[in-house]
Image: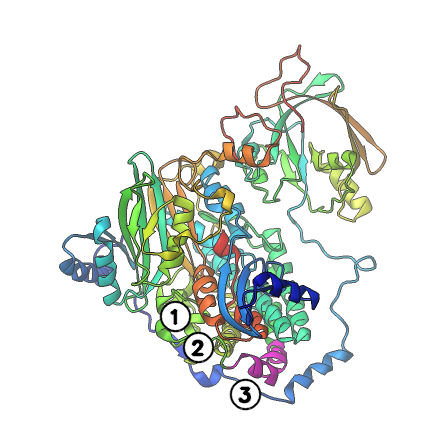
Amino acid sequence: MANGQEGGMSMREQAIVDKILEKAPYAEGKVRRERRIEFTVPAERIRDFLTLLKKNNFELMLQITPVDWPNDGEIELIYQIWSVTHRTHVMVRTRIPRELEKARMPTVKDIYPVAETYERDAHDFFGVYFEGNWKMEMPWILDDTEQDIYPLRKDFDMLQYVKKKYKILDRFDENKDNYVI
Amino acid sequence: MEEIEFKIAPESKIKKKPSYIKPWLGLKYLFKKPVTIKIPHEKTQIAKKYRGFHTLDWKKCVGCNFCGQICPARAIEMTWLEVDGKMEKRPHPKIDYGRCTFCQFCVDVCPTGALRFIESFILTSEWEEDTIQLFDWVPIHPEKFRKLQESYNDWRFPVEKIEFNKETKEVVYHLRDGEVFKFKILGYGIRPPKKQKGGTDSKPD
Amino acid sequence: MVAQSELIKEARENGMDLLPLDKDTYELFFGPQHMATENFSIILKMDGHRVVEAIANPGFLHRGFEKLAEFRPWHTNVALLLRVCVPESDVPETIYSMAVDEIIGWEVPERAQWIRTTVLEMARVSSYLFWIMGLSFKLGVYTAGQWAAAYRERLMALFEQLTGARVYHIYTIPGGVRRDIPSDRWLHQLKDTVEYIKSKLPDFDHLVFENYITFKRMEGIGVMNKKFALSEGVTGPNLRATGVPYDVRRADPYLLYPELDFEVPVLNEGDALARALIRRFELEQDLYILEQLLDMGPPSGPYQVSDPRLKNLPRFKVPAGDAFSHVESTKGDFGAYVVSDGKNKPYRVQIRGPSIAHGIRVLEHLLVGSRIADVPVILMSLDNCPPDIDR
């Protein structure tokens, strides 16, 4: 874990967390270290929470990071936002089920317009559908033939896919324990 | 460290004024020598420890496969070799320059310092089957490589031609100074090959 | 309304290889072969020579780094992830290494920090020179571009001596750097190079930044305001050109930057010219930073953390955890988010390139209404780098 500097250094961050949590009792928050804070929010309140953050001068959305946790049956979505005013990076974590029909989130593109791009990215690689983002169906990075395979999910069999796509794999035995493509 | 009030540059320093005359000042370079290096007539300087081709001290190599595991491009494959009718006790790395990214992590992890690198970096071939074999080799001894590099001094690959017999798995290196170096590939992988089969347990291409 | 097939026929007869949409507009595929777009494509809907609508079409450089990184040992990923940003490959190396350092809790030795900072600044200078090359080609001032390429060559030679490679250095690794500074001579050479490039800056001013052609081509083109830029996630020089003093080196200091003195340029115009001038000023500041670093001199000590586990790199394990780190690249805020689950390979690596914000929605917005000749200029003023969109 991060070597958090508790005490005087992170007072400023703690004050921000307290201020946000006061208005959003449904969230959990903590200071990771200097200039790094994180919140955990239930998926259905994400729009409320991001609206609150935007009002509190968290201006720049840097990225939406999906992380697949197949053992928990969940996909974690991390909204990474930077505040130019507070000089703090905030991660807003939320978890949604990873089954394709249930992996749905409300879009936040009206709060952070740039999220539209990140949501397209998350949809292409992880199969998270963002309701309300009309660009969801537009082609993004992957080709038409690669749609609906969601390659960055953990259960995507890359070896099998490469074999199918490129016919000749290479000269290595498959039974090697440490196979790398 | 917290809250450094940083300096903002004044606009007057950043902004420029358009000029009709100043662009012509570039003309002064007409009377200067070009910076271009004229390659066949001039030599480029290659930095010491430039990450080029590999060299391998076959005596030192213990066949631990660290290089094969760390390789990000999976360019290294452990190969069991036979030189002059005697099987090498440990497998040696065979490097595929079609895949190699020249990151030299393999050299960093080599516990005995058997696998090293040299500054030579030029390897070209025509699109013919037998020249492509050049890109897949078990490196030669560092001293031999350095001697060849010093005598030619053109940063080229030290082997002119590699003959590979697909049936007998015999490999012949034709070095640039006319020397011939022969060995036989018995098999691939970390475990030693079974003797009876004669090393056909893996497809070479 | 005329049928589309007839329009196409008419276009073909007149020797035009384009796709008319209706009588007034036609569709134009800009890139991925076009030099200005750098393997990135924009579908433009044109009315005469004006852009009516632009749709960014990325994906030509997708190599799946984020997935591939999940299959490789921790250190090896450096050789892979640096390909996300071609002109300054040290940035992805450093952010990945910084994130891994943070997860492990490594305190990087001072000497390694000095080298990392120097390498990052050298990369910034060389990237800005590369950008001047691109910009001057797009403006038609080819001479300055050739100069920039020639001066960049000097930095590449220094990189070659330091790291052993010219473009993809594979130098910064978790825990420090891979090699020590070769000799004191290298430091002198770097000093000479910095001075040399500094002495050549007025030439670039004369030919590019004070040239009336530049002003004619770039002034008032691709204007964005502060509010738009912030909401669209614009960072780096593009954001500073709209009046927001945000620089990661100051806002979230890393490595030796708290000890260094430099000025952050901010302009309020938000047009292509402002972005270009900000970059021009930052090049000067980077050279100044390099001078300070050289005056400071590399601290003595090790250039890597000493850890017995580093002897066995392929099986080197990183404790479970996650970290986000970011640095200021010439293109903007470059970040990496790394998750570890305690194995010898990362669980998830995500690289956040600044161009994912600049190159899609911002570009689509800025291109509307511009002339076709300005499309390369706007692209270049945003310093769009498609590899970090596609990854």
The chain under label 1 reads: C
Q: Is residue B71 above or below residue B192?
A: below
Question: Disc 2 on helix, strand or loop?
Answer: loop
| Quarter of the rendering occupied by the N terminus of chain B | bottom left
Q: Quadrant of the C terminus of chain B?
A: top right
Gap between marks 3 and 2, in whole Å? Answer: 17 Å
Residue identifier under label 2 = C270
Circles 1, 2 touching at the beta carbon (< 8 Å): yes
| Percent x, y of residue C356 | 45, 59
Mark 3 chain: B
- Horizontal placement of C377 versus C357: left or right? right
Is A78 on the left or on the right of C44, as rendered?
left
Viewer-proximal residue, C267 or A133? A133
Q: Which residues are magenta?
A: C200-219
Q: Is residue C325 visible?
A: no
Q: CA distance from mark 3 to mark 1?
A: 26 Å
Dot 1 or dot 2: first in sequence order is 1
